[in-house]
Image: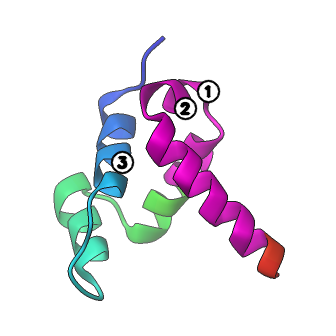
Amino acid sequence: MDLGQRERDILALERRGFPGPGAKERAIREELGLAPVRYYQLLNALLDDPRALAADPVTVNRLRRVRESRRAER
């Protein structure tokens, strides 16, 4: 089973660069219609989804490394 459109849109947004503070949160609201808190909840669940890894291994592995390094800092 493939990822849904919302999951693909989340991964696509994570592949992009953002020019300054607040730009990513604005894109989350405007393009996906989500509150940033909900977006990050969905993203975190997506990182554990094998379908996401199969669909975009570079992005998912990069985000997993970031998540693990933040957990290690705590």
Q: Is residue 55 above or below residue 21?
A: above
Label 2 crowd bin: few (<14), some (14–19), many (20+), radius 10 Å: some
Q: Which circle's residue, 3 or 2, is located before the other in the chain?
A: 3
In the figure, is residue 61 to the left or right of 59?
right
In the figure, is residue 55 to the left or right of 48?
left
Q: Which circle's residue, 1 or 3, is located before the other in the chain?
A: 3
Across and down, in percent, residue 15 comes to: 33, 53
Tell me which residue sits at (22%, 66%) in the image. 27
Circles 1 and 2 in contact, beta carbons < 8 Å = yes
Marks 3 and 2 sit apart, C-alpha to C-alpha, by 13 Å
Marks 1 and 3 sit apart, C-alpha to C-alpha, by 15 Å
- What residue does disc 1 label? 50
Give the residues in magenta.
Answer: 42-71
In the figure, is residue 9 to the left or right of 11?
left
Quadrant containing the C terminus is bottom right
- What residue does disc 2 label? 53
What is the residue that sits farthest to the top in this orientation?
A: 1
Identify which residue, 13 or 4, lies in the foreground.
Answer: 13
- What residue does disc 3 label? 10
Identify which residue, 62 or 14, lies in the foreground.
Answer: 62
Tell me which residue sits at (54%, 32%) in the image. 53
